[in-house]
Amino acid sequence: MRALAWALIWVACACVAAWTLIAIPLSALLSHGRRGWRIAVAYDQLGNTAAGGHEDETFSSRCWGQRSKPRYMRMVRIIDWVFWTLEGERDHCKNAWHAENASARKRAESNDAARAV
């Protein structure tokens, strides 16, 4: 039974993956691409999770946080180059790391405030 449940989860994930791979370019063509961008970020977090990272962290942020390791520093250079080329953004990985840490602090403060009530 357990194997069947995991098989059904896998099928559901495969269906969602197929749909989202269609939705990203449709979003870029038919709208301003905001939905496609959010889907891309979700894939980024999924890939980071599959590689052993935290589920709420993007791979860009992880690379910046692990930049003392040569393989991550190489990825920082590649990712930063891609975002500089596409968006004109400098230091994308560093910016992602700071943004995600600020969001994590806000979530923690919000959780602490909710517990205090």
Image (cartoon, rainbow, N blue to C red):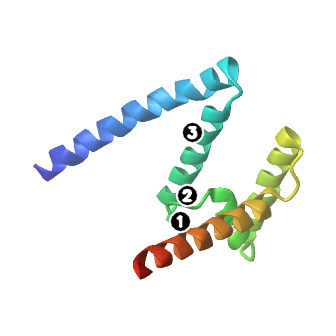
Left or right of 55 in this view: 33: right
Residue situated furthest front in the rendering: 117
Q: Which numbered dot is residue 99?
A: none
| Residue 74 appears in the rendering | no
At 66% across and 70% down in the image, what residue appears? 101
Distance from the alpha carbon under mark 1 to that under mark 2: 5 Å
Q: How far across and how far down the image is residue 33, in percent?
A: 68, 30
Q: Nearer the viewer, residue 90 or 82?
A: 90
Q: Nearer the viewer, residue 37 or 67?
A: 37
Circles 3, 2 touching at the beta carbon (< 8 Å): no
Q: Secondary structure at mark 3?
A: helix
At 16% across and 44% down in the image, what residue appears? 4
Q: Nearer the viewer, residue 28 or 81?
A: 28
Q: Secondary structure at mark 1?
A: loop
Residue identified by numbered label 3: 39
Residue identified by numbered label 2: 48
Q: Can you say whether 14 is above or below 4 in the image?
A: above
Q: Which numbered dot is residue 53?
A: 1
Q: Can you say whether 9 is above or below 45 in the image?
A: above
Left or right of 70 in this view: 85: right
| Label 2 Cα crowd, 10 Å radius (few <14 / some 14-19 / many 20+) | many
